[in-house]
Image: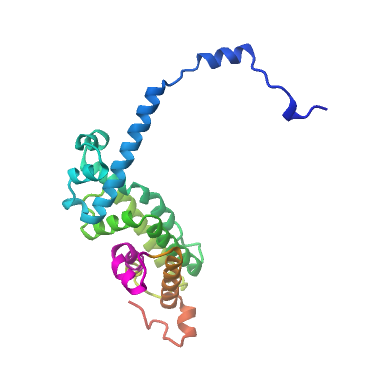
Amino acid sequence: MHCPSSTPFYLTPQALEADSAAPRVPAPARQERRSRLRHRQLILDAARNEFAAKGFSACQTLDIALRAGVPKANLYYYFHTKENLYAEVLQPLLEPLHLASRRLHPEADPAQALQAYIEARMQIVEDFPLRSKILCSELLHGAQQLPEAWRESLEAQNRSEIACLRNWAERGLIRAIAPEHLLLFIGAATQTYPTLGWQIALMRGVAQPSSRDFQSVAATLTRMVLAGALPALASAQGLPARALAI
C-alpha cells in the first residue's frame, strides 16, 4: 500500500498546456492594483475620521484628502462624489444592523430576544465606534444624506421590530408599553458610548471603554429593559401590571 503523501504528482500534457495558456497578470499591473486599493482605503479611513469629527455638511473633501495624504483628485477618481464616499463609509454597518434587528421576531422568547438584540447593538458600537457616531448624527439630522436604499432598509427594520413588540404585548408576553419608545430608549442607550465618549471616559477614569465595559453596559441595559417590559418581573417586584406602561 502506498502512502498518499509519498505518491508522486505529475501534470498531464493537457494540464501543462492549459497552465501555460492561462493569462498571467504582469507584475506592474499587480503593483498598480495594490496601490489603488491602498489609496482607496486611505481615503475611506480618513473620511471616517473626518465625518465623525465634523459631520457631513461641515466636512470638506480637501480635508479628507489631506488627512489621507493623497491628491484631492484621487478622492473623486475613486468615489466620484462626497455623497458616494459618505455612503461607503457607512456601508459596513448595514448588515450588522440587519442581523441585530432579526433577533426580534414573534416566535422568539422575549427575554432572550431582547437580551440578544441589546448585545448585538452594543457589539456594533464596539466594533464600529466612529461609524456608529456618524450614523447617530445622521439620524438626528433627519437622515438627509442616507441613500434611499438605506432609508428603506432601516424603515423596514423598524416596522418589523415594532410589529414584533406589539405581537408580544397582544399575547401578554410583555407589558403594554409603546414599542417605538422602547426601541428609541435602547437605541439612545447603546449610542451613548460613541457619541459621549469623553463624558464616559471622565466618569470611568479611562481613555476609552474596554470590551468588558461594553459587556457591562449590555447587561445593565438588559436588566433595565426586562424589568420594565416583562410582566413576571413586574409582578415579582410588587408592581402593578401597568405601572410603567407608556
Q: How is the image coloured?
A: rainbow
| Residue at 21% in and 54% down | 55
Q: Residue 142 placed where, x, y %?
A: 21, 57
Q: Is residue 149 visible?
A: no
Magenta stretch?
A: 186-208
Q: Residue furthest bottom?
A: 238
Which image quarter holds the N terminus? Answer: top right
Q: Residue 39 placed where, x, y %?
A: 31, 37
| Residue at 72% in and 30% down | 5
Query: What is the tally of numbered marks visible in this picture?
Result: 0
* Nearest the eye: 220 or 170: 220
Q: Is residue 106 above or below residue 59?
A: below
Q: Tell me if 33 is positioned left or right of 63 in this view.
A: right
Q: Tell me if 177 is positioned left or right of 148 in this view.
A: right
Q: Main secondary structure of the magenta part?
A: helix
Q: Is residue 30 above or below residue 161?
A: above
Which quarter of the figure has residue 168? bottom left
Q: Residue 122 placed where, x, y %?
A: 41, 62
Q: Residue 222 placed where, x, y %?
A: 44, 71
Which image quarter holds the C terminus? Answer: bottom left
Give yes or no for residue 196 being in the magenta stretch.
Answer: yes
Which quarter of the figure has residue 40? top left
* Nearest the eye: 232 or 37: 37
Q: Tell me if 44 is positioned left or right of 229 in this view.
A: left
Q: Tell me if 131 is positioned left or right of 61 in this view.
A: right
* Nearest the eye: 184 or 212: 212
Q: Is residue 233 above or below residue 212?
A: below
Give yes or no for residue 135 being in the magenta stretch.
Answer: no
Q: Is residue 93 visible?
A: yes
